[in-house]
Image (spheres, helix red, strand yellow):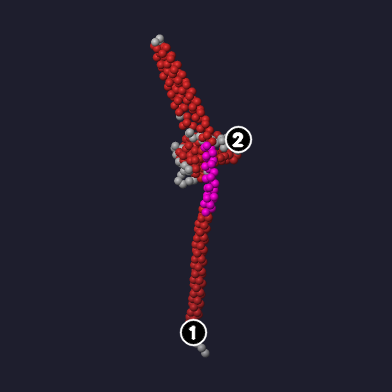
Amino acid sequence: MQASGPGVLNSTESSNEAATLIQLKDMVSKREEKLEALGQGMEKALKAYDDLWDRLQNEILENQKMMKEKLATVQSAVVVAITPAINAITPAIEETISSAISDCFVLLVPAFESSCQAMVRRVDYASQEGMASALQKFESVNAPLTNDLRQAISYATSLTETLSRELGGLHEKVEGPLNPRKELSRLVTELKYEKAFECALERGDVSWLCGQVDLHDILMMEPVALSQDVLLSLLKQLADDINNDTSRIVEWMTDVAGFIETSNQALPIFEQVHKKLHHQYNLSTITKAEQASLRVLMYAINSMMDSCK
């Protein structure tokens, strides 16, 4: 018979515990292997994602570069295609207009000037001769009357000299700018927007000039194309013209207002503009759409007025 005492039991329990520990270690080891494999898989996935992102970024940049190059090529081709036609047409148009105007004034002005000068010479000669004859008759008869007559002769001579000088300046006046708007167009073509709008403000041609250019694009230019003084004057004069074409002028005023810096100097102009807008808003001829745009602009001007205070 085998012994079955306490010593045998302890030996069996120790064996069981050892077996359990071995099983736990195996399980932990397998879990660690799985976690390590999972981590490696995630690293590979992240690396693949990074590689894919870098490739996409590179492709986007390459596509952008390619589009810019194609656009530049198309623009160059268009310019090359239309430039000869424009160059061929423009001088012919300018020459035709210039010749027509010049021919008209070459015929008209000299003839008019010659006639006037001949008339002045005849009047001057007749008056001088008549006055001299009268002066000789009265010299020995009436001294006070003779003095009055001398003064009259001097005054008449001065008048004829003044008239001759004015006629002499007739060519200069005629040769001045015959069409102010042509000058404005030339300034715009030369990208001299500040000067163009200054001239338009002086001549009251602001609305016309705004209709010839893309005002929003000009305002967005860097560096700034229009000074604050010009912008303030532009806002005021557009408000004065608002009856002419309310929808377009309100659109232009809204663009201009967005680029004006608030200051104490600007406050009086803002107040005048707001008053004109409010008057326009209450007219019976204004449409609902125009009232909506006027309301937005008035709100913007009112906010700018508050900022000045």
* Point 53% across, 55% down: residue: 70
Residue 112 shows in the view: yes
Given the image, on which type of amino acid does mark 2 rest?
Answer: Thr
Q: Are marks 2 and 1 in contact (CB under 8 Å)?
A: no
> Which stretch appears magenta?
73-99
Given the image, on which type of amino acid does mark 1 rest?
Answer: Val
Res 285 label: 2
Q: Is residue 277 above or below residue 13?
A: above
How busy is the neighbourhood of tag 1: few (under 14 within 10 Å), some, or many (20 plus)?
Answer: few
* Point 52% across, 45% down: residue: 87
What secondary structure prevails in the magenta region? helix
Q: Position of residue 264 (x, y in %)?
A: 44, 37
* Residue at numbered disc 1: 8
- Looking at the rendered structure, the secondary structure element under dot 2 is loop
Q: Position of residue 67 (x, y in %)?
A: 53, 56
Q: Position of residue 19 (x, y in %)?
A: 50, 79
Residue situated in front as seen by the camera: 252 or 146: 146
Residue situated in front as seen by the camera: 123 or 14: 123
- Looking at the rendered structure, the secondary structure element under dot 1 is helix
Tell which tag, 2 or 1, sits nearer the viewer. 2
Q: CA distance from mark 2 to mark 1?
A: 115 Å
